[in-house]
Amino acid sequence: MSGKERLPVRGAQGDLLRLVANGHAESRAELARLSGLAASSVSLRVEELIDTGLLVEEGSGTSRGGRRPRRLQVSSTAGVLAVADLGAHHARLGLLDLSGTPLVVEERPCDIALGPEATLDWMAASFDELLLAHGPSGAPLRGVGTGIPGPVDPASGRVVSPSRMPGWNNFPVAEYLDARYGLPVLVENDANLLAVGEARAWPGCDNLMVLKAGSGIGCGVIVNGRLHRGRGAAGDISHVRVRTDSSVMCSCGHPDCLEAYASGAALMSALAEQGIAVRRPADLVALVDDGVPEATALIRNAGRLIGEVLTVLVNFLNPDAIVVGGSLSTAEPLISSIRAAVYERCLPLATRDLEIAVTRSGPDAALLGAGSLLLDTVLS
Amino acid sequence: MSGKERLPVRGAQGDLLRLVANGHAESRAELARLSGLAASSVSLRVEELIDTGLLVEEGSGTSRGGRRPRRLQVSSTAGVLAVADLGAHHARLGLLDLSGTPLVVEERPCDIALGPEATLDWMAASFDELLLAHGPSGAPLRGVGTGIPGPVDPASGRVVSPSRMPGWNNFPVAEYLDARYGLPVLVENDANLLAVGEARAWPGCDNLMVLKAGSGIGCGVIVNGRLHRGRGAAGDISHVRVRTDSSVMCSCGHPDCLEAYASGAALMSALAEQGIAVRRPADLVALVDDGVPEATALIRNAGRLIGEVLTVLVNFLNPDAIVVGGSLSTAEPLISSIRAAVYERCLPLATRDLEIAVTRSGPDAALLGAGSLLLDTVLS
DNA sequence: CGGTTTGTCTTCGATTTCGAAGGAAGATGC
DNA sequence: GCATCTTCCTTCGAAATCGAAGACAAACCG
């Protein structure tokens, strides 16, 4: 648990280590293919990494028709990453090994409205507890990462004009964590982390749109296999104007934003108006599963609105898949009405091979994404 | 004019040559910075390229505070590219040298409705004329490229379900040209070529949306400095549903597509209904310039509709700039109403540094783009 | 079951690339 | 006008990388 040590990695070793850690490669041959290096060079570097104790050989993989590859893994004693995914009222916290595999994951209630210092201090204290209880002995902490339910400027690691995070505007989260840990730090929007995490479960899909449908609506975009940030704010779809009969003012100051109709928060308040009170989006899903018609109708309508927005983006970006995550994603009618809207209205050329599916990597996807991005900087 | 010779380029030489040809670098020092190679290695390779006659040293560049760099250029005798941009009724044809600089450009009337064989044969004949009249002696033809006003499958080089190109559906344009020339061939959607060409004029802008507003509405997307194709159909914005009072059926079978309201073709037929007949989009612009109120109102409305669609995409992609090209782009009211719609409705975070401007590289942009993409394959 | 095919991994000499040092040529400042 | 700085480019030994050849190991197939 000593921490603050630089990994003894130099040159091409880092690239190879990263490929193994991120799960892109698990044999020397695969490394050679993906890194572009000659097989001989790969063997040399891998041997060095094994000597250093960062990589281990572990059993053999499945054959592709010839000799079985010797499977490579990042050593479990090489280090630990501490990652979190902050939500409005709950946070998921976890420890990962240097291959990005979770060692522990916990969900704890928290209140982001207490402001950045209180929340981040609480997060750090939780990390300490986790490390004490589950941190493998001898494995130093190598990096810290967290997801934020609002826009983050990637360059500075600051939160930028978030809608429901009082006190956080312009707070330098990355700087704050760096001062505390002196380690590689990652601060990223939660939907973006979800997207990165999910992308690992969609090999071969280089262009992905990952929707996070919870109390808010977020979206992470993977273009060419990498997270697309634009100037920092890319992926927003919640403040798109939708076609409706009524007219509602959104918190952003414009009328008829998608968020005002289709976000979990909006659905819950609409349900409350009909006399059905729910506390969190997951309760809403439970009502849908129970066949409560009011809830189902609302979710259906939300799916249709989201689908209509996605229509524009699918024609434009022409992705391989749309993945739906977030706490509302388990509601079957949501997916099916998104599907219906997209398939009905998009160009056949764009939907020809388009897959629309729920998350493959489950509730820890965002933590896995944080691990993946952190590894890029940790493994210099 | 002999042609069909492979360039004697191997290994890193190609990368360097391409950087010079594409205009990204013009000195050894710049090459070292951009290619990531050591300065010494660059010097070696450049010397080889000069010995082969592919590069020439030509005067000196401007100093950045120290010794002036020796400017490098692709030799004018190294080869020629023949490129075209096919439109519905007109085509631009040109010859470029291996640095992508135009040697000749001509605009000729043509009729794409005659079908692929007739049109491509006509194009080839035109290339032959140009080569005879303006082809520098001793410079062999090295590649052929063309833009198509419809969707192109990048892998096969086929036209895929175009809307206004009878007889072209599924025609293997690339194969046809390859059979004729036996040279590197490029076949790409016209808006995509425009985007690539325009991107050269926007250094530092890695994410770009380039709108082509002519008789149709097309859009090319540059993400991370490279053309984004998705599964081949990316960039379509013309079949997005817009908010209008009336209801018009689009040729794609859906109601209220952007194209049915804001394309040059739609505007012209709307104008015809008001008793004003025009033949081509450029005439429409002339009317607007003359202050004909009907034309101006139509263009304004088109700009607003386009702007509203762009709104969604700007929030989502968060680009550095939106560039408007195509024959309608010279109509001032079009740009200003696009600007108004985007700035009014987009998130401040997304429009903070967003530039919305007309094309910088003029009418030859698409040809330059074709050259740029062709060079990537020609300079192996 | 034995040959064939396919794929993995290592060895070793040839090639490429790097990087530090220094010369060349102009900008800058006194 | 002269010293100093910056940038450009080259030289040359050290280090990394390549690639062909071959050993190894399993799947495939009559």
Image (cartoon, coloured by chain):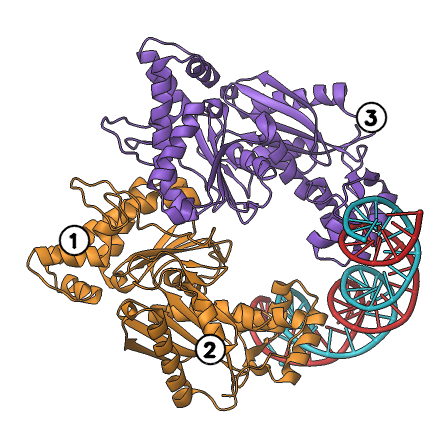
Chain colours: A orange, B purple, C cyan, D red
Left or right position of A374 against C27: left
Front position in the image: A276 or A90: A90
Q: Chain of mark 3?
A: B
Please give the name of the residue rendered at 55% of the width and 79% of the height, measured from the top-left corner.
A74
Q: Amino acid at mark 3?
A: Ser
Whole-angstrom CA distance, mark 1 to mark 2, is 45 Å
Please give the name of the residue rendered at 49% of the width and 91% of the height, measured from the top-left corner.
A137
Residue B291: x %, y % from top left: 40, 13
Q: Secondary structure at mark 3?
A: loop
Residue density around tag 1, few if under 14, some if 14–19, many if 20 or more, within 10 Å:
many
Please give the name of the residue rendered at 45% of the width and 73% of the height, measured from the top-left corner.
A177
Mark 2 vs mark 3, foreground winner is: 2
- Which residue matches tag 3? B137
Figure check: A173 above or below B249: below
Q: Amino acid at mark 2?
A: Arg
- Which residue matches tag 2? A180
- Which residue matches tag 1? A298
Residue A180: x %, y % from top left: 46, 77
The quarter of the picture where residue A88 lies is: bottom left
